[in-house]
Image (cartoon, helix red, strand yellow):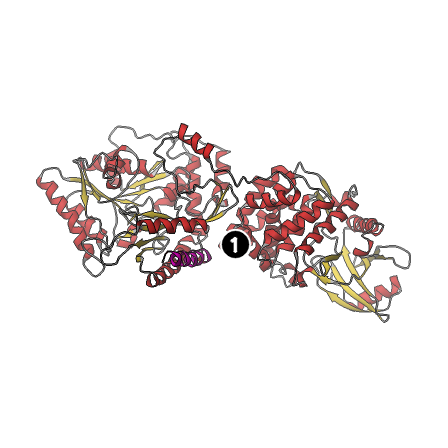
Amino acid sequence: MTFYIEQISQLVKNFYNIDANITWLAGYDEQNFLLQTTAQEKFILKVSQDNFPFIEAQTEVLDLLAKSSLRNNFQKQIPNIKGETITIVEWDGKKYFIRILSFLEGKFWVDEKNKTEALCENLGSFLGKMDAVMQGYFHPAIERQYLWDISEATLAEKKLHFIKDHEKRRIANYFLLQYQMEALPVIQGLRKACIHNDANDYNVLVNDDAVTGLIDFGDMVYSALINNVAVACTYSMLHSDDPLTVAKQVVKGYHEVNPLTVEETDILYYLIAARLCISVTQSAYFASLNSNNKHHFITEQPAWKLLFQLIQINPIKAADAFRNVCGFAPLIDVNDDYKNLLQDRDDVIGRNLSISYKKHLKIVRGALQYLYDDKGNTFIDCVNNVSHVGHCHPVVVRAMQKQIATLNTNTRYLNDVIIDYAKALTATLPSKLKVCYFTNSGSEANDLAIRMARHYTQRNDVIVLDHAYHGTSTLAIEMSPYKFDSKGGSGQKPYIHKALSPDLYRGKFQYDDKDAGEKYAASVLEILQQLKEKKTPAAAFICETILGVGGQIPLPENYLKNVYEHVHSFGGVCIADEVQVGFGRVGEKFWGFELQNAEPDIVVLGKPIGNGHPLAAVVVTDAIADAFNNGLEYFNTYGGNPVSMVTGLSVLNVIKDEQLQKNALETGNFLMEALKLLMKKYPIISDVRGHGLFIGAEMVKDHQTKEPAIPEIDFVVEKMKGRGFLLSTDGPLHNVLKIKPPIVFNKENAKALADNLDEVLGELH
């Protein structure tokens, strides 16, 4: 029930003998009113319903604080004419609890524009002193399951679906998953206390560098003591360009008067994130109810801003910072040069496994499009296309966790999920591609695809593109010029044939040739004719639908359409290698071959299919599947296992549900335009090409000779790493900047990448 001004005025006169002007105040749960007497006295009246024991606990806590040195920093309770601090009234058969509290003068934290480090430290100190006073207090009513209690943050998961913005929902879900993994197992064993639980920016009063008051004990709960610090950190960090420094000062002030433990500070980052997630899911829930209570949304926008800031802060950096201000042993060893780790790696790991960057990185955590190293640095991942929908995507992770805790076995037992996934996967492909074989890697899948093509055609020879790469199995290496032509390679086998790479920048036919696609396709036709004359006709033609290590090269218009027609006319099979290209990355289409208006006979899938989980697939026509079913059983111990199938299905669902193909298109176009502007500014960039978030930028020393800018591009990659952007190089001449981030990569990331690249190229120039 809502009480009106007239009713409140009468209640105040009858029960408190106070004659005052009444003003309604907004509140979250309770009804609040400002009372102003003719003597210029001000009071706050609060109306609560149906929870007398909890109201009683609040009065006891205020009595306790009124007897402490902090007495002037909290509201005092005004008794009614009977001397009671709680007035019980009945209306329409329901009980309401009325309290009048003194009015605290001061400026709310949210209104203080100059929040100094001293003020933040004083907030921590103030809360530490308050918690020391409240230590040992307990009332049964405060031991409750309460959605605003950070220890109950998993309850917020049920309201994630109310967040309509895909990126925001993904980030909130990510942080709730991390809370569940990192904080929840620890927090249950930490010390508990009665905590205020709501030192937010509308409850804390300040004057210059000091906290002068704290109001509203309506969120009071018996919970982990560190949650009180986490709440204060959360709201003090809002509206700050350096939120971690703010939180450090709060922690420092608290620890100096009420010492924390290292176990508490180490999970503080996740507790802050969890409190924000509770807040934004509640706001989304109330929005779904069309609430017009502004208090339901008052923190929504700054909370989202802070969550986006928080995911860019390495959690190890945060934990180390909190340890530092408390005098605990550091987490980060800035002097560790990995000498021992590198020696151990050299002892037990193959010597020809390369490591990226001159100054090596030790990556310890992933968060969607971000990676965190052990030194506290955060990197925007611009190159790991394997984690297609983002590192540790919460929907994929949860699905995997549930399935691996339920069952994981092989395909010799009936299981629904392999059928569900195969149907979902083939629904994205041309209708003729309808039979799935599941493997563990793209290399294995390419190997199997060639084996099936040979079964179907009863032929052996394979046509590939020059500079192509198709994997690490023996057969995959044999059909990868990138490997067999390189140092240590075994050379070209007589049954492998190289067609011209259809490179419109460096190749025989370039951008100004409108018939380049048909002319490059003629290179394949020529090989087909030669093989027929030798009576060793081709079994298959295989190529990536955008060339990866070949130089991030989109195929010329009509190239695949013509090649596939030529191959079919000679009885061969066309294989589309979508291992790096597929699943919406190119933006305009779901599959790379769709950009060419061509349909393969076999499509090979890998890398993004499982978001980093070892999963790949070969999808073929009925005719090819029937030919392969020749009496020799195909069995793959791990291929098609339930965990892999659930993983693959989750990835497909995430791409669809979060509209990530659209994001790849829009963000990719945005980034391509930014790179083209840099190309006009810096001649070292000679070509920008790609589709969606599959982009290459070629770098040369001279536009006429096209001499590759090798030292320069290495300088750029290293400098960009130092600025927090992970890039790599590709192409036969190793002079193409490779950009293939997780497709959750957003426009803000793209702008930051382009802006920093601009500055690095300026240094180089």
**Quadrant into which the C terminus falls:** bottom left
Q: Is residue 307 visible to us here?
A: yes
Q: Is residue 74 visible to us here?
A: no
Q: Is residue 699 left or right of residue 93?
A: left
Q: Is residue 63 left or right of residue 113?
A: right
Which residue is located at x 51 percent, y 43 percent?
Answer: 375
Q: Position of residue 594 (x, y in %)?
A: 29, 52
Q: Nearer the viewer, residue 116 or 527?
A: 116
Question: Which element is circle 1 on?
Answer: helix
| Magenta region | 748-763
**Quadrant into which the N terminus falls:** bottom right
Residue 140, located in which quarter of the rendered image? top right
Secondary structure mainly formed by the magenta segment: helix
Please tell me whether residue 481 belongs to the stretch shown in magenta.
Answer: no
Q: Position of residue 697 (x, y in %)?
A: 33, 54
Q: Position of residue 712 (x, y in %)?
A: 34, 51
Q: Nearer the viewer, residue 514 or 258?
A: 258
Q: Is residue 346 left or right of residue 29?
A: left
Which residue is located at x 28 percent, y 40 percent?
Answer: 470
Q: Can you identify the residue that label 1 sits on?
A: 168
Q: Which residue is outermost to the bottom?
A: 38
Q: Position of residue 540 (x, y in %)?
A: 20, 41
Within-10-Å neighbours for mark 1: few <14, some 14–19, many 20+: some
Circle count: 1
Q: Which residue is outermost to the right?
A: 82
What kind of residue is marked 1? Lys
